[in-house]
Image (tube, rainbow, N blue to C red):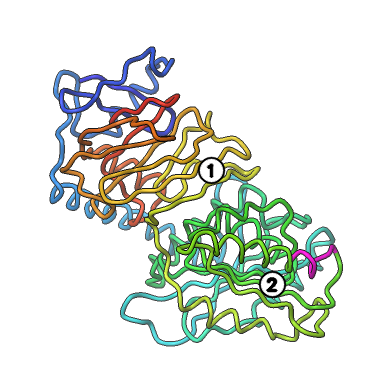
Amino acid sequence: MVFFAIENFVYLADSSASIISMPDFNMSISKTLLTYIFCLSATASMGQPAKSLTKKEATAEAERVISDYQEKQKTIARTDWEKQKIQIGNDSLHFTIKIFGEKPADGRSLYISMHGGGNGPAAMNDQQYKNQQRLYKPAEGVYFVPRSPSNTWNMWHQEPVDGLLERAISDAVLMEGVNPNKVYLMGYSAGGDGVYQLAPRMADHWAAAAMMAGHPGDAAILNLRNLPFFLAVGEKDGAYNRNGLLTEWSVKLDSLQSADKGGFVHNAHLMAGMPHWMKQQDTISLAWMAKFRRNPLPQKVNWVQDDAVRNNFYWLSVPNQSARKANTVFASYQGQEIHIQRNDNDTLFILLNDKMMDLDKKITVRQGGKVLFTGKVVRRKALIQKTYSDRRDADYIFSAGIVVVHNEAKVI
């Protein structure tokens, strides 16, 4: 057995997979990383090759990993729910919830609704937080209103917010039976600013998103390829050019959807005669969003890194050293073929599972017309464990994959 580690991934190379050599990746394996690898891979040991799993075995391992996590996490989730507070290190998020409607057979919906306010005294944002609690009433679902962790202009799109909202989703799945494919993001004013930023940055988390009376800043519109996006701004809301920017985004989304028929679903409204406060005309967003379910494994992905970089996006992943602002990946798959149209990262992980393609048949990876890889992949128990540990989302468990390093591809 040959062990390799690149930050947040482990490679178990044996006779059934292409061996990734040390010079190819210019890395060293420290004692700490070796210890980490042994802890991660319960079935692997020196001198004993890691077993390649069958499809049935991979499914059983995924079910076991999910069950073990949920058993351990439920106590934490219950404490979060009882205290109405999520704490991760030094970062915390207070919240309130209201339950609407009967629980559907496929699980509840979750509406994360972010308040306005921004750079000012805490009392101002506290008032906006209270207002948001009664602003929207979905026909069904858990209405989750968080209190911004800070009192700054960018309070909803600072990096810690990502992890706090991910924990909120995980808690809601355990405590309220939320379907993770029915999670919706919405926000008003500064909360709308947050939706402009978090919707594309975390597009793989949401079924749909609704931006009300916000400003886009430098948000990555291309990431919305697989995320239905609702926009509403008052016709007379000229502060920070909110009304003008809504029109610009509407035109851009129209153009993107025209060029890519399978993506960029959107619904934009410049509310006639309305100033910043739209007198709840924007509540039509709730019924519009509720029509959609998240597709966690879309066949085409656009990924442009924000200033708060991420390691995972749908079925793509990068190590920390490759995660840089503006780095872009355009990739797609169909049948047994994966196409990389653009990749700015020196290392890119293409993560695979049996819902995407037949992992028992040969897979081809192409980039710019060049074939980077043709062959079979291997289902790994360690990769199932690792990908669930990273995302805590059953739909993002991957059992196999291919890594592309400097335009050369190998089996994970």
Q: Position of residue 237 (x, y in %)?
A: 83, 74
10 Å crowding of disc 1: few (<14), some (14-19), many (20+): many
Quadrant, the N terminus: top left
Q: Tag 2, which secondary structure? A: strand
Give the amino acid at mark 1.
Arg
Q: Tag 1, which secondary structure? A: loop
Q: Main secondary structure of the magenta part?
A: helix
First in sequence: mark 1 or mark 2? 2
CA gap between label 1 and label 2 equals 25 Å
Is residue 19 magenta-colored? no
Residue plotted at (63% across, 83% down): 283
* Farthest residue, direction top: 23
Residue plotted at (45% across, 73% down): 292
Q: Which residues are magenta?
A: 240-245
Residue plotted at (50% across, 38% down): 342
Q: Position of residue 175 (x, y in %)?
A: 40, 69
User: For this rendering, which residue is in front, 54 or 273?
Assistant: 273
10 Å crowding of disc 2: few (<14), some (14-19), many (20+): many
- Residue 274 lies left or right of residue 155; in this view the side is right
Q: Position of residue 95 (x, y in %)?
A: 60, 67
- Residue 65 lies left or right of residue 228; in this view the side is left
User: For this rendering, which residue is in front, 338 or 181?
Assistant: 338
Residue that numbered label 1 is attached to: 310
Residue that numbered label 2 is attached to: 212
